[in-house]
Image (cartoon, rainbow, N blue to C red):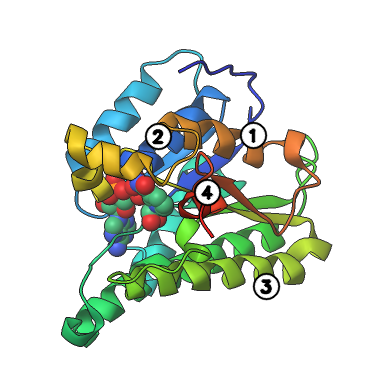
Amino acid sequence: MYQKFNRRLDGQTALVTGSSSGIGSAVALALAKEGANVIVNYSRDEEGANKIVASINNDNEAGSAIALRADVSKEDQVQEMFRQSIAHFGTIDILVNNAGLQNDAAIQDMTLAEWQLVIDINLTGQFLCSREAVREFLKRGPRPEVSVATGKIICMSSVHEVIPWGGHINYAASKGGVMMLMKSMAQELGPKKIRINSIAPGAIKTPINKEAWDTPEAEKELLKLIPYNRVGETSDIGSIAAWLASDESDYIHGTTIFVDGGMTLYPGFYGNG
Ligand code: NAD
């Protein structure tokens, strides 16, 4: 896929949660290509994280990278990750709240633990990381030499912040929550020049949804939901994240950018009714 890099994030540091795989790793690579230093957060997959770090550090034109383990749903681990990140790179300019998972069940079968796990990681994790980032942005103040904004937060949401998703109520509720977390933080922190937005991917080929695209039959079914008629690639999200973190998008604040090939156009209604 064609991607153009313009070193739009030179001198900045970005923390990308859950970036040892999938969308997060593509975002980490795209931000690094723009010149940012990157903290590759992971919870279990140390090998995956180290691979992303190596590919960034082996690229002479990219920023530099380190891997840090932390479970984003655990307050003490998140605080320690921020402490180590700031000790290593001096500050943080960009947070990408990407870590997330699904744990699906029909409501009558869903345990409290299955509900809670998804809410804790997908929603509370975004709160905990955002709070630490905001504390750092407010403490250090503006850095006009690298960006117009004092800090930037990108929340990885989903088309399911607006499309209801039976069989996945914990996931849809977490992403609906992310939408209002993002908008409320944006309202609160805009006056402090902290710029906050979400990206809502549609169907992107990653481990989270492999069964939805890894056979021709499954992919054909999935394409019925995508007017633009292709399943998304992780680089589709990486390029949008790089732009959204850069000053080129400085007047975009408190918005969700849907990157979904038209999934939110509800194609099932085409020609119907
Ligand atoms: P993925 O499974 O490859 O990535 C999720 C990442 O989050 C993994 O690296 C995982 O290790 C990490 N993670 C899980 N629990 C964690 C925790 N407690 N602490 C830290 N990291 C943790 O799947 P993905 O598709 O790349 O998902 C990334 C984000 O994109 C998620 O928030 C997901 O909801 C969102 N999303 C994905 C799609 C899609 O079609 N793939 C669509 C909409 C939204």
The first of marks 4 and 1 along the sequence is 1
- Looking at the image, which residue is at 36% across and 68% down? 171
Taking 239 as reference, is 106 above or below it?
below
Quarter in which the C terminus is drawn: bottom right
**Foreground residue, 200 or 37?**
200
Residue under label 3, please give it.
184
The first of marks 4 and 2 along the sequence is 2
Q: Secondary structure at mark 3?
A: helix
Give the side of residue 31 with respect to residue 209, left or right.
Answer: right
Residue under label 1, please give it.
243
Taking 17 as reference, is 49 above or below it?
above
Q: Secondary structure at mark 4?
A: loop
Residue type of the residue flagged with mark 3: Ser
Give the side of residue 130 with respect to residue 55, left or right.
Answer: right
* 3D distance between C-alphas at marks 3 and 2: 28 Å
Q: Is mark 4 within 8 Å of ligand 1?
A: no
Residue under label 4, please give it.
270
- Looking at the image, which residue is at 51% across and 41% down? 89
